[in-house]
Amino acid sequence: MDWSIQDIARLSGTTSRTLRHYDDVGLLEPSRVGANGYRYYDEDALTRLQRILLLRELGLGLPAIADVLAGQTRHADALLTHLHWLQREKERLDRQIGAVESTITKLEGGEQLMAEDMFDGFDHTQYKEEVEERWGRDAYAKSDSWWRSLTPQQKAEWQEKQKSLAADWSSAAEAGIDPESDEAQALAARQFEWLRGIPGTPGGGAAGPTKEYFTGLGELYVADARFGANYGGQHGAEFVRDAMAVYAARNL
Amino acid sequence: MDWSIQDIARLSGTTSRTLRHYDDVGLLEPSRVGANGYRYYDEDALTRLQRILLLRELGLGLPAIADVLAGQTRHADALLTHLHWLQREKERLDRQIGAVESTITKLEGGEQLMAEDMFDGFDHTQYKEEVEERWGRDAYAKSDSWWRSLTPQQKAEWQEKQKSLAADWSSAAEAGIDPESDEAQALAARQFEWLRGIPGTPGGGAAGPTKEYFTGLGELYVADARFGANYGGQHGAEFVRDAMAVYAARNL
DNA sequence: GCTAAAGGTTGACGCATCGTCAATGTCAAG
DNA sequence: CTTGACATTGACGATGCGTCAACCTTTAGC
């Protein structure tokens, strides 16, 4: 019992081109080749293909996969080597991301960057036209895809956090406390954690916002009334900015 | 005043091959070409080259760099686009790292992985021969490079943390407290934080150890007397393992 | 003026993994 | 016999140079 190249491609979720490539490089040969040159694959070949695709999804290169399947390398060894490689790549990316971020903030004071990203956090769709006009459709689409990937519950939680944070900022500002006080700094810490929730931005991910991003964001609250309004107007925004700057200087 | 291709290569820290490539793709043309075909560069060209190399270090592709230098794209726009690209790449890497880690732990119970990495944390050089024999020179070299990159102060801090942690574990184990108790869990949390300090391992970096890694590590303490000894012997190691397992189940 | 050492030039292959035509043969159904 | 659907073997493309190879020029020393 065997199948044509298309059958196998569909069964395994890959393409016939890929199968021919694997044949070319000797990674997976058809179990039988017709007199007409047609490739036919049996169940063993399908099994082998599935192992190949599994390893490939983990990011292994075809030669490495070939070694593993040939029994020349143990699974764990190959994966371990690969893991370290991935980790070094990630570190490299982290460094590059940091460098790009700081270059951008140096270049533009960070305002544009933050404006774009911060549209995520507030009423997301409200500024659709403006975002598209100012940053291009692509920028809006990217921001949008994150927001829409959230469940309704997650969206509600996100907005709830933002609201309560904004409210606490406002009352702190009205109370006239010192931006350097523990109270204000605790709010800044919450602001920081809140920002970590946005993935795919210089303010998101496990590491949290960068120093430049965080301070620049505070500036934005003052510069743009729409953001500032969330924190109690001009005065509130200035208070938030100062507290954030202190927080950044001390902790980032 | 102009310089030969080698002069410029040395001044800018790149190679003549690269310069000829940039000429080929039209990214940087020499200011003058001799009748013999030799390329000569003036100061303007050098400046342009330096801008190119700057952008390239940030990871931009040559076409993108060309756009920026031609004034067709604003610096910030190009970098912003690039930043998002980097971030998506990083997320992809994160997912792959997670997948590879869990595959390894499934494959080998995670013991080998952890054994390798944990040599970092204890007396690092003590097991050099064993590590090399068991994991190859490469593995040892990688572990070693991290450890040696630390300042003496950092090394001392690291070991101090490990010692105090081990001591606290030992006394907690002797006191016979419950692995689920707050005290034990606080120790597990410290253990977790401590592991975050090793970069380039599944237990290092901002995200901290994975669930599988963390629980598997506990198992290792029991399985390998050399590690267990740090935590008060057999009984202590079992206590640590249990507390870590509870911590992992609850928080990871 | 000769010679060897440096340094320059233009190709062209290699790398990783297929996607994507292009030109063409084969098979099953009507 | 015709018409699709499916198959085959090339071969280019993409990323950014490293690395020969084969072959001139310039420079410095004798």
Image: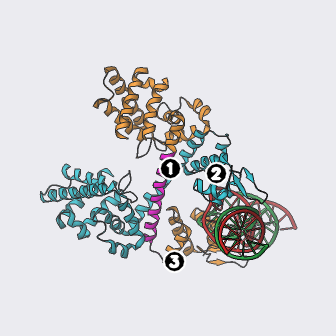
Chain colours: A orange, B cyan, C green, D red
**Closer to viewer: mark 2 or mark 3:** 2
- Residue for badge 1: A96
Distance in Å between CA atoms under marks 1 and 2: 16 Å
Above-or-below relation of A230 to B192: above
Query: Quick one: SS at disc 3?
Result: loop
**Amino acid type of the residue tagged 2 in the rendering:** Leu
Where is residue A63? Give x, y as percent: 55, 71
Q: Are marks 1 and 2 in contact (CB under 8 Å)?
A: no
**Amino acid type of the residue tagged 3 in the rendering:** Ala
Category of crowding for the residue at label 3, using alpha-carbon neighbours closer than 10 angstroms: few (below 14), some (14–19), many (at least 20): few
Category of crowding for the residue at label 2, using alpha-carbon neighbours closer than 10 angstroms: few (below 14), some (14–19), many (at least 20): some
- Residue for badge 2: B62
- Residue for badge 3: A70
The residue stretch that appears in magenta: A70-99
Q: Is residue B222 left or right of residue A9?
A: left
Q: Earlier in the sequence, mark 3 or mark 1?
A: 3
Quick check: do tags 1 and 2 share a chain? Answer: no
Query: Quick one: SS at disc 2?
Result: helix
